[in-house]
Amino acid sequence: MSLKVKISSATVALGLLVAAALAGAAPANAADNRNQCEQGKPCFFITADFASAPWAISPWPTQPDISLDAHPLNNQVSSINMRTGRSMTIWDSWNGTGPSATVAGWNALGNLAYVGWNDRISSLKTI
Ligand SMILES: [Ca+2]
């Protein structure tokens, strides 16, 4: 069973990144957008090192089983900032199937490639 999920992005941060890209020069220091994450939720980024606009899932954690299905985040998450003490299970496939892993609460994973999970997450739930 698939539950609908509402995910929002911080468009202001995205605008800043686009502006930097259009200027044709990389910023001196890559953006770290962890401070834009919503308190009390996991925060997802489609680039490593929290450089892209953050995505938060709402409502959280009252919606415990989330399958990303055709959502833009499906197979795109590259870094995670856990702004919650709750841990989270992630799966490679939709609806809690396939290989899984646990992301501890209050944890910041700057590059999921280091743990073999870059661009793989397709469903998740709080523990
Ligand atoms: Ca996947």
Image (cartoon, grey):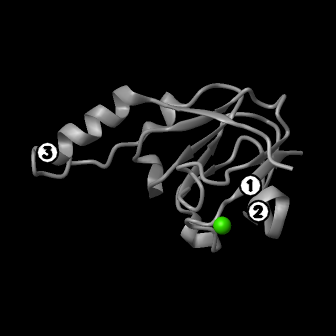
- Displayed quadrant of residue 61: top right
- The kind of residue tagged 3 is Leu
Q: Nearer the viewer, residue 85 or 65?
A: 65
- In which of the image's four quarters is ligand 1 placed? bottom right
31 left or right, relative to 18: right
- The residues tagged by marks 2 and 3 sit, at their Cα atoms, a distance apart of 35 Å
Residue position for label 3: 22
Residue 14 at x, y = what percent? 34, 36
The residue lying at 13 percent from left, 45 percent from top is: 22
* First of labels 2, 3 by sequence position: 3
- Displayed quadrant of residue 19: top left
Q: Nearer the viewer, residue 43 or 4?
A: 4
Which quadrant holds the C terminus? top right
The residue lying at 79 percent from left, 36 percent from top is: 85
- The residues tagged by marks 3 and 1 sit, at their Cα atoms, a distance apart of 33 Å
Q: Which mark is residue 91?
A: 2
Q: Is the residue at mark 3 in contact range of ligand 1, meaning its CB lies under 8 Å from it?
A: no
Residue position for label 1: 123
User: Would you call the spot at circle 1 few (<14 residues within 10 Å), some (14-19), or many (20 or more)?
Assistant: many
* First of labels 1, 2 by sequence position: 2
- The kind of residue tagged 1 is Ser
Q: Nearer the viewer, residue 80 or 91?
A: 91
Residue 41 at x, y = what percent? 69, 32
104 left or right, relative to 49: right
